[in-house]
Image: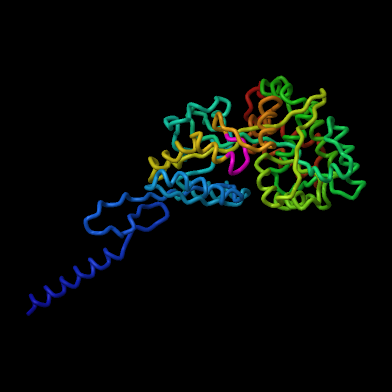
Amino acid sequence: MKKLRFTSFMAMVMALSMFLAACGGESGNTGTSNGGDQAAGEQPKEEQVVLQMHSWRVEDKAGYEKIIKEFENENPGIKIEFKPFKATEYNTILNTALQSDSGPDIIQLRPYQSGMALADAGHLEPLDDVAGMKDFPQDVIAAATAKDGKIYGVPLSINSTQIFYNKKIFEENGIQEPKSWDELINVAKTLKEKGITPFAFGSKEGWLLSLTHGVIAPGAYNGNQFVDQIVKGETNFLSPEFLKSLERMNELVPYFPDNFTGLDGNDIRTLFFTEKAAMYIHGSFELEVLRQMNPDLQLDFFPMPTEDGKSVITTWVDGSWGVNAKSAHKEEAKKFMEFLASKKFGELFANEFKRISAVPGVSVDDPLVNKMAELSQSSSTPYLILVHFNEGNPTPKATIENTLQGMYLGERTPEQVAQEVQKAAETWFEPFKK
């Protein structure tokens, strides 16, 4: 009797196990799944790897999902889930995740030392062996190369910053593109006298200040001439040229919106695309966003006039895409890196986002993007504080952002801003230690 009861019990256990196996499946964000729908006699389906891809570009979500679909169609065994975060919160969220070993498989990296600090900390997988990496120019790949000489990111785009303007407002008020600093101030005065806010600007988010200074400053220090000298340690941030760049940031205050110290990036973008402000100092990555917000907006831009009668456009290599060194699916993630380094991705990216791809040989059918690309080739100067002075703690970049916020709140003078930036650079920049 006991033997009969035991046999019946084991039969129930086996039946229950078979039922659960039939209903069950893999779970988790970064796992595999065969769907559990294989019919008898069919070949087993390839397991699908799901990769998490994190970014700070909320604006790009729909575009990336379209581009990723192209990759997935060619690689049915890999699915990529694109998840963007608010730009100002991204670094904190990413660093917390990486330190707790729960970071995404694919990571959008800030350019230059800010992103490469993750490589220095051991969070990133080297990508030197990824097909296509050797095709990038050396000055481009340098933005994703760490101190150990290895490459940790696939460069994404060449960014530029310039002064966008509303063509309709300019034409209605008889205003021409300025060719000097004095002409720019006169344009701002004319607009203000007509009741139009000259610049859509806010100082609530520090990165907007370093970015704006990156446009204004080369006009004061004549672009590459000063950059070459300061990189060699032949001048510094206390020089008259650099001080003038800070004084000019202050000179623009009368032409900013009311309560500009409380305005963030979304606020000032809205001011511009709703045509309540005439000019908008910002990056090339804003072009398509502005068009989506207001398809009727009549846009153009001009580069920054310099003291020697020329003009310059500020450029840098934007972020790159890297692989988490602790990803469980590094092989699949590197497969996606190959796609990101390909001309196919470069063309998809350039046409979807109307930006300059970092992939060599890619063009886009857009007059303003091509104008940016041409100026980037002929009249560019590097985004000095990002490309060359984004190390240390605090970095000179973080310092200029914080101290310019202080200047706009009336707590610091331009001279004090220059002194604090110089002090931050002297903590690590070797030419300043001599």
Q: Nearer the viewer, residue 362 or 87?
A: 362
Q: Is residue 342 left or right of residue 15?
A: right
The residue depicted at 68 percent of the width and 36 percent of the height is 367
The residue depicted at 85 percent of the width and 36 percent of the height is 176
Q: Nearer the viewer, residue 159 or 367?
A: 367
Above-or-below relation of 94 to 7: above
Quarter of the rendering containing residue 214: top right
Residue 170, how many percent across, how many down?
84, 42
In magenta, the rendered stretch is 350-357
Q: Is residue 362 left or right of residue 197?
A: left
Residue 355, how many percent across, how many down?
62, 39
Q: Is residue 232 left or right of residue 68?
A: right
Residue 362 seen in this snapshot = yes
The residue depicted at 82 percent of the width and 24 percent of the height is 309
Residue 365 on the magenta segment: no
Residue 68, how many percent across, how many down?
49, 46
Q: Nearer the viewer, residue 112 or 362?
A: 362
Residue 201, how many percent across, how many down?
77, 46
Quarter of the rendering containing residue 390: top right
- Report the residue that reaches farthest toward the right: 193
Residue 119 seen in this snapshot = no
Quadrant in the picture for the N terminus:
bottom left
Q: Is residue 392 left or right of residue 311?
A: left
